[in-house]
Amino acid sequence: MPTLAESIASHLPQLRRFARLLTGSQQAGDAAVSRMLQAIVADPGAFPEKPSRVELYQQFLRILAGIPEDSAQQGASIGQTAARSLAAMTPQARQAFLLVSVEELAPREAAEVLEVSQRRAEELLTQASEEIARQIATDVLIIEDEPLIALDLQRMLEGLGHRVTAIARTRDDAVEAASSNKPGLVLADIRLADGSSGLEAVNDILSSFSVPVVFITAYPDKLMTGERPEPTFLITKPFREDAVKAVVSQVLFFDQQARRRHKGPAATS
């Protein structure tokens, strides 16, 4: 039978992904996961002996809700796109949407994680979908070397109201496309056709201007170790349309929050 540590370890990559999506940065997300693990070590008797994934997510959200904002100020994610913190913490509707769309929990499981009724969870999912539908459209650069995948992403993004301005297959093409028409969002595959890296292409782009980024990978566990600088926002191949919608919505949500904070409060007469 698996030990408590083994039961938790098997869910950690997924929990880190969820935490980074919620907080908007690797550092803040991983710190929140670390705080949960510290709580378990300090009082293992307070936790189930072999916690399920649902129980772990539930405990994580309890601990996350108790982190003071001033202790959650963390560095920005790759490219320093914005100074993000729990001040921009997503509302419960977005938590429900991410649990179902990205983490692939059933609505009843999401309700259990959020400690609400299933009816309330379904109301939250509807609320999140309506919020996403109202989201401001933006120009998108897709960096993807597989034509069919790129076209599928283009269809999904345009279905959300966004405009795909270019599809780049290599690092050089991506940098040139971003320079020609600065996008409001970049979707980048980690591995490209010419052997170059989507990470390198994104870093080249971000050296010129700030833009939110979502990475695409077939190997998410390798980028969710918490041992080195890693992407905050990930779409996993093969991807599901709801997951793409959820992750793109979340990264744009944080970008909009950051822009509002940068502008400061509106002047009053």
Image (cartoon, grey):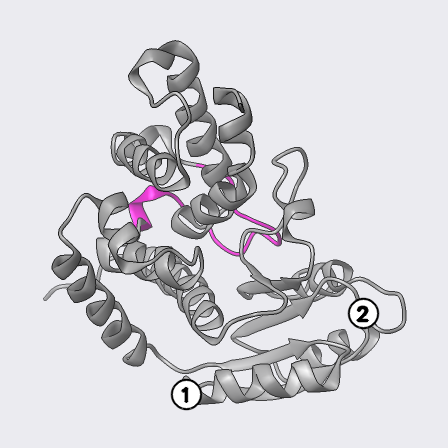
> Mark 2 — residue?
192
Which residue is nearer to you in this view: 178 or 59?
Answer: 59
Q: Position of residue 166 (x, y in %)?
A: 66, 87
Q: Residue furthest right?
A: 194
Q: Residue furthest left?
A: 269
Rendered-image quadrant of the C terminus? bottom left
Looking at the magenta stretch, what is its main secondary structure?
Answer: loop
Q: Residue drawn at (66%, 41%), measured in percent from left and top?
A: 229
Q: Position of residue 220 (x, y in %)?
A: 63, 52
Which residue is nearer to you in this view: 167 or 124?
Answer: 124
Q: Quadrant of residue 234?
A: bottom right
Q: Quadrant of residue 217?
A: bottom right
Dot 2 lies on which element?
loop
Q: Is residue 242 left or right of residue 120?
A: right
Q: Residue drawn at (30%, 38%), measured in percent from left and top?
A: 58
Which residue is nearer to you in this view: 150 or 269?
Answer: 150
Per the rendering, the mark at residue 132 is none
Q: Is residue 115 magenta?
A: no
> Mark 1 — residue?
161
Vertical comparison of 55 with 201: above or below:
above
Type of residue at label 2?
A: Leu
Dot 1 lies on which element?
loop
Type of residue at label 1?
A: Gly
| Highlighted magenta segment, given as a residue range | 74-88
Q: Residues within 10 Å of mark 2 (few under 14, many from 20)?
A: many
Vertical comparison of 16 with 236: above or below:
above
Per the model, the C-alpha gap separating discs 1 and 2 is 26 Å
